[in-house]
Image (tube, rainbow, N blue to C red):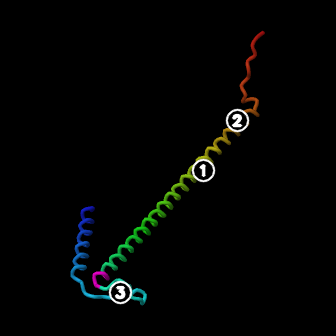
């Protein structure tokens, strides 16, 4: 995959050099109705287009990274919420069990028949 990417980049560079060398004619570049100063030949117009394309791709990469980061944050938040919900349910179950055990212990202390008799040592 790396090799393919480098091959495509090399081919694009070769095409760019060929366009610049084969187009020495005069040209004008206008932007929002005004002529851009310093751009007087076709290869300069091409280079301006290449710069715009590079800036566009950089902007798309930044947007893509931001989108990926936001998605990862949402996924992590969802996982944390699920973990929190599970721990709350576990704690609630433990609380119920402890309340039942406490209620049984209190019932056992109130019932004298359930309390074992103590031995009295002879004098």
Give the residue at the far top of this rendering: 123
Query: Any magenta on residue 43?
Result: yes
Which numbered disc, 3 or 2, marks the residue that appears first in the sequence?
Answer: 3
Task: Check residue 56 for magenta coloring.
Answer: no
Q: Observer-nearest residue: 14 or 37?
A: 37
| Residue on which the image places disc 2 | 105
60 shown above or below 103: below
Q: Residue at x 73, y 36 (%)?
A: 106
Local crowd at mark 1 within 10 Å, few (<14), some, or many (≥20)? Answer: few
Label ID, residue 88: 1
Evaluate if marks 3 and 1 touch, with contact meaning CB atoms under 8 Å apart.
no
Mark nearest the camera among 2 and 1 is 1
Residue 109 left/right relative to 30: right
| Residue 88 % position (x, y) | 60, 50
Q: CA distance from mark 3 to mark 2?
A: 91 Å
Question: Could you say whether the residue bearing mark 3 is in a helix, strand or loop?
Answer: loop
Tag 3 residue: 29
Residue 90: % across, % down: 58, 47
Of circles 3 and 2, the one toward us is 3
Residue located at (68% from left, 42% from top): 99
């Amino acid at each position: 995959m790396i090799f393919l990417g480098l091959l495509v980049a090399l081919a694009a560079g070769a095409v760019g050099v060929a366009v610049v060398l084969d187009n020495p004619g005069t040209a004008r570049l206008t932007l929002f109705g005004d002529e851009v100063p310093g751009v007087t030949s076709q290869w300069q117009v091409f280079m301006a287009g290449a710069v715009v394309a590079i800036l566009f791709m950089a902007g798309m990469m930044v947007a893509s990274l931001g989108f990926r980061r936001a998605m990862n944050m949402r996924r992590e938040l969802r996982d944390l919420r699920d973990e929190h919900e599970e721990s709350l349910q576990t704690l609630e179950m433990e609380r119920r069990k402890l309340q039942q055990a406490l209620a049984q212990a209190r019932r056992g202390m109130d019932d004298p028949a359930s309390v074992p008799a103590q031995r009295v040592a002879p004098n």
